[in-house]
Image: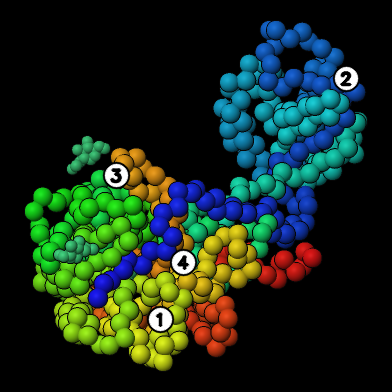
Amino acid sequence: MKCYLTYLIGLTLLFINIINAKGIKVPPKEEEEPINTNDKFYLIYINNPYGEYKIYSDENIQKREESQVFVENLVDEIQSLINKNINTYKNPEKLIEIKEEVSSTLKTRKRDLKNLNDYGLVYPISSVKDKVVLYAYLSDELSKKINKDIENIYGIFPNKASTSLQYVPYNKEEILAETGWKDLKVRENTDFHLSLISQGKYNRRLGKKYDNNYYYPSSSGKDINLVILDSSFNFNYTEFSNTHERTIKCAANVENGFASTEKIDYYCGKVTRLYHGETVSDVAAGLLHGTANLANVYGVSMAVNNEGEINDSDILAGIQFIYENLIEPHKTVINLSMSGITYEQSEFYHQYGKIIDAITEKGGIVVAAAGNSGYNLGNGGYGGYGGSYYSYPCQFKNVICIGGIDNEDEKNKYNIYVSHEDSNYGDGVDFYAPFLVKSDIMIEGKKTRILHQGTSFSSPIVAGMIATIMSEHPEIQFTKNKIYEILKENGQGLEVSHLYYQGRKGIMANNGKRIIYSDEEEEEEKKE
Ligand SMILES: *[C@@H]1O[C@H](CO)[C@@H](O)[C@H](O)[C@H]1NC(C)=O
Ligand SMILES: *[C@@H]1O[C@H](CO)[C@@H](O)[C@H](O)[C@H]1NC(C)=O
Ligand SMILES: *[C@@H]1O[C@H](CO)[C@@H](O)[C@H](O)[C@H]1NC(C)=O
């Protein structure tokens, strides 16, 4: 019996552009503050019959033109109005403070400096063609007076902030209150596979603002060990460069039924065209693409051929090595990179299940991929085969089994909370995570952006997520059951449906942050 790495389409050397559909942020309608109740800054809009006045050019190279004279006279006029009406200000002392601040801002301004030093409470800020705008600090009364008395004025308005930077306006306090995290980290505008697991269910539509941030606890898997049994690894590049904060290494290389610890450090296993372990480790724990970028990483490589097959002997040897050497109780998440199908419960199957049980008893938490056959993993069997087929290790009772949702961008604009047609599904699947991931891995010495898909990648996303949950609470002795309960709780209302079988419902994996800062459906309808 052979096992297969659960990859889907090999490697696609493709750069996927996540659609960054951020709309314009409409600032919330301000409480209409009764205008002119207090002293404040105003923008005074004036028609300038003499045409454009250069605000930033040097006096020495610009002859005094009519326009300049006009603007300077205007400034003089308003300043003298200010001087005459100091008693109308609610807080006249503030004028001195403002003058000081303004003159220090204007110090580098070559022209008009003399003039403006004298005043400082009114000066031009913009002029184009026949329009000029002055900026002035005025009392209510004075603003009304100026509006009435100054010739050519066509508007006077309190200064306000009507423009804002285009970012998703998340609220840190709100997130900490919901998640109970000690502190928040945000990776802005990052991979789809990351943003999806740190927000609730939304309906994604083209042209709508989607929150591409990944929100996670700042502990980010710190002091939790992620053990990855897979094909091959390379940890010597940027995704794993934060070795001052965590341990990252190859723990063993398995061949001929034996796990050897000779001659391994940042590299192990024979590199295959699948680049499977490389991608899996990046998605679990890479600096940019991983869910837990402070978790310790221990790679255990196994002999894999180009079809992704692994001998039973190496699976047992690898998992045995992990059991004996790598389980720090309640601090270890093991991600198993293979899935196999059997119709009889063979001795291999029993032995495999027993080691997993022993690992669980020791306090390790095992996560595995559901597999990519598109089968119904029912109660101990594949639906289409009379219930007599088993998928391992996913269906072992002590394994958290992860399927994939169809998060392919273009295809699923309307609902991505559907299991991918190639992902196994059904009662045997515990949770779902993105099927499609983006990663940076080393290929022939060059860092290369790849898109990979398969439940192989859904599984490490969740393995990393579990590490972040555990790192937040060093005081809790996490067990498989406890983690299962937490993920179930986090997944409330995050239902995953099946493309064809209405009754087949699953649960989306979520790290606890479910507030949605993406645009929601109602807004779309309002617009339509
Ligand atoms: C890591 O890669 C660099 C080149 O990028 C190389 O010089 C260095 O020797 C490598 N480190 C190890 C431990 O192999
Ligand atoms: C499985 O074992 C056989 C016999 O030792 C070996 O020839 C073969 O290459 C191994 N297959 C893999 C995928 O390692
Ligand atoms: C996680 O397990 C899946 C399948 O069970 C595997 O394909 C993948 O390589 C593993 N990832 C890690 C991080 O071990």
Q: Residue 50 bears which disc, if any?
A: 2
The answer to which image quadrant residue 438 occupies is bottom left
**Residue 220 percent location from the top left of the image:** 33, 61
Q: Nearer the viewer, residue 490 or 98?
A: 490
CA distance separating discs 3 and 4: 25 Å
Residue 200 horizontal/vertical position (percent) = 53, 71
Quick check: is the Cβ at mark 3 less than 8 Å away from ligand 1? yes
Q: Amino acid at mark 3?
A: Tyr
Name the residue that disc number 1 marks. Answer: 429
Task: Measure the C-alpha gap from mark 2 to mark 3.
Answer: 63 Å
Q: Residues within 10 Å of mark 4 (few under 14, many from 20)?
A: many
Residue at image coords 29%, 44%: 237
Which one is earlier in the sequence, the residue at label 2 or at label 3? 2
Q: For the residue labelled by badge 4, is the local secondary structure a helix, a strand or a loop?
A: strand
Q: Give the numbered dot on residue 237.
A: 3
Q: On the picture, is 388 further left or further right than 521?
A: left
Where does label 4 land, which residue?
Answer: 434
